Image: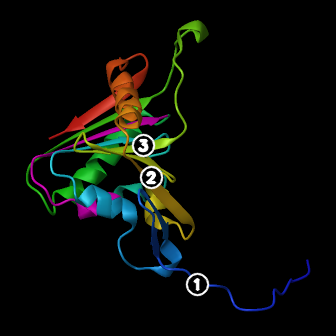
């Protein structure tokens, strides 16, 4: 295969590009904590993550920035087996207990096993983050990519109440629809 040479230098951009409600991060340009980490580090009461691919690769490292005692972390994902989410919960606890003493961690992994096709629920593809029940984000990458990627990724802060309600209602839908047939659940305190 032939090598292709592109003339000129590769343009460099700032590691963070902020809009009014959006920011873009290029991890290849910065050793600073990624935007996602900065957002969850600011949580005072509750972090809710809705991410279908939450625990690929090195995803649990995003939680090393958590500093607030008494924090509740709720994660809803898709497709991980019970032993996998238990192991991930243990990894997250080992990371956050270095910085805080009291916490609550709940993980639900939807896996529509043994459910008749006509009774299956529609799952989701996009990623969402809710901080302290007030700040809602549409997130471009999953947790692992937030930590390990050298690609651009962004987060959009939703500012309209109706937009926030869509995300919080979606999260509550999957909390409410949880049962042992549809999903695995694990908790740590």
Residue 61 visible to the viewer: no
Query: Alpha carbon of mark 2 to alpha carbon of mark 1: how far?
Result: 23 Å
The answer to the question of whether label 2 and label 3 lie on touching residues, with beta carbons closer than 8 A, is no
Does the segment drawn in magenta span residue 145?
Answer: no
What residue does disc 1 label?
12
User: Does label 1 or label 3 sit earlier along the sequence?
Assistant: 1
Depth order, front residue of 135/3? 135
What residue does disc 3 label?
128
Q: Is residue 189 above or below residue 17?
A: above
Res 155 quadrant in image: bottom left
Can you give x and y, in whole percent of width and height, for residue 165 in the image? 36, 31
Look at the numbered disc 2 and give the secondary structure of its residue: strand
The answer to the question of whether label 1 and label 3 lie on touching residues, with beta carbons closer than 8 A, is no
Residue farthest bottom in this picture: 8
Residue 162 visible to the viewer: yes
Can you give x and y, in whole percent of width and height, for residue 7 in the image? 81, 90
Which residue appears at 86% of the width and 83% of the height?
4
What residue does disc 2 label?
156
User: Does label 2 or label 1 sit earlier along the sequence?
Assistant: 1
Can you give x and y, in whole percent of width and height, for residue 30 in the image? 44, 79
Look at the numbered disc 3 and give the secondary structure of its residue: strand
The stretch of residues the image draws in magenta is 61-78
Query: Alpha carbon of mark 2 to alpha carbon of mark 3: how far?
Result: 10 Å
Query: Alpha carbon of mark 1 to alpha carbon of mark 3: how far?
Result: 29 Å
């Amino acid at each position: 295969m032939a090598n292709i040479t592109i003339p000129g230098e590769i343009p460099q951009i700032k590691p963070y590009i902020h809009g009014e409600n959006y920011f873009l991060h290029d991890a290849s340009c910065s050793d600073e904590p990624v935007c996602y980490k900065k957002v969850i580090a600011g949580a005072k009461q509750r972090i809710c993550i809705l991410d279908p691919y939450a625990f690929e690769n090195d995803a649990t490292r995003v939680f090393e920035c958590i500093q607030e005692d008494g924090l509740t972390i709720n994660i809803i994902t898709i497709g991980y087996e019970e032993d996998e989410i238990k192991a991930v919960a243990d990894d997250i606890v080992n990371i956050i207990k270095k910085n805080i003493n009291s916490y609550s961690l709940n993980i639900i992994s939807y896996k529509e096993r043994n459910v008749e096709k006509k009774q299956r629920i529609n799952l989701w593809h996009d990623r969402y983050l809710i901080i302290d029940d007030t700040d809602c984000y549409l997130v471009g990458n999953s947790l692992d990519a937030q930590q390990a990627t050298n690609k651009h990724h962004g987060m959009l802060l939703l500012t309209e109440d109706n937009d926030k309600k869509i995300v919080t209602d979606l999260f509550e839908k999957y909390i409410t629809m949880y049962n042992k047939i549809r999903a695995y659940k694990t908790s740590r305190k």
